[in-house]
Amino acid sequence: METSNRVPLEDALRRVDEYRRIPQAARNGYQADAIALADAYATLQEQNTSLLRRIESHQARIDALMLEFCPDEMTAEQKAEWASHQRVVFGCHCEIAAMGDDFEPDGCVMDDHQDQDCTHAELLRAQGKTKTDCQYWQPIHMAPRIASALRAARASGAT
């Protein structure tokens, strides 16, 4: 039976750093091939990551448009999936209606442990809850239908 000097691919890829330390002129063909393969593999991984980001970005845009223009055609699972991937900026909307149109949401007093400045915060903390449980902790600058869908998904416990 003929024996082979072949090394499994995984072993070769693990040893690439070792092969890179060998001067180029002193490398054998196998070592040079392993380095080239590892470089090509790294390039493919980067391209794959980039393509996945683009796909996710396009899907997020599609979902946002669906939520704004045809929310009734989305299932609860689709809404929850969309909501779970959003990096929505939230703020406290408490008393905004009383403050006027130019008033913007602000941060939560619970972040600074100033619960005494808000009756809602005091009650939430006493119940062992956080600002995310507060009815006034809502998205900032978001289309009304999207904000409504996100609140509905949160209320149903889907996110």
Image: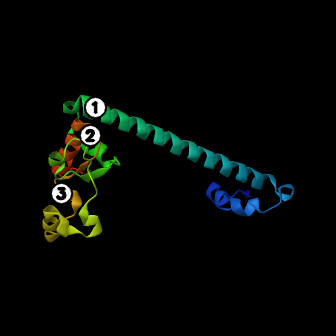
**Residue occupying the point 34% across, 47% down:** 85
Q: Nearer the viewer, mark 2 or mark 1?
A: 1
Contact between marks 2 and 1 (CB within 8 A): the answer is yes
Q: Is 48 or 93 nearer to us in this picture?
A: 93
Of the two numbered discs 2 and 1 on the same chain, state the one appearing first in sequence: 1
Q: What amino acid is at disc 2?
A: Gln
Q: Is residue 52 left or right of residue 109?
A: right
Tell me the quadrant of the picture where the N terminus can be found: bottom right
- 157 in relation to 62, above or below: below
Q: Is 103 or 153 nearer to us in this picture?
A: 103
Q: Is 72 or 25 nearer to us in this picture?
A: 72
Q: What amino acid is at disc 3?
A: Cys
Q: Which mark is residue 134?
A: 3
Q: Which residue is mark 2?
A: 78
Q: Which mark is residue 79?
A: none
Locate residue 67, reporting x and y percent. Answer: 26, 34
Q: Which SS class for mark 3?
A: loop
Q: Is 144 or 92 nearer to us in this picture?
A: 92
Q: What amino acid is at disc 1?
A: Met
Locate residue 17, reporting x and y percent. Answer: 70, 61
Of the two numbered discs 3 and 2 on the same chain, state the one appearing first in sequence: 2
**Residue occupying the point 31% across, 31% down:** 65
Q: Which residue is mark 1?
A: 66
Separation of marks 3 and 1 at Cα, in angstroms: 27 Å
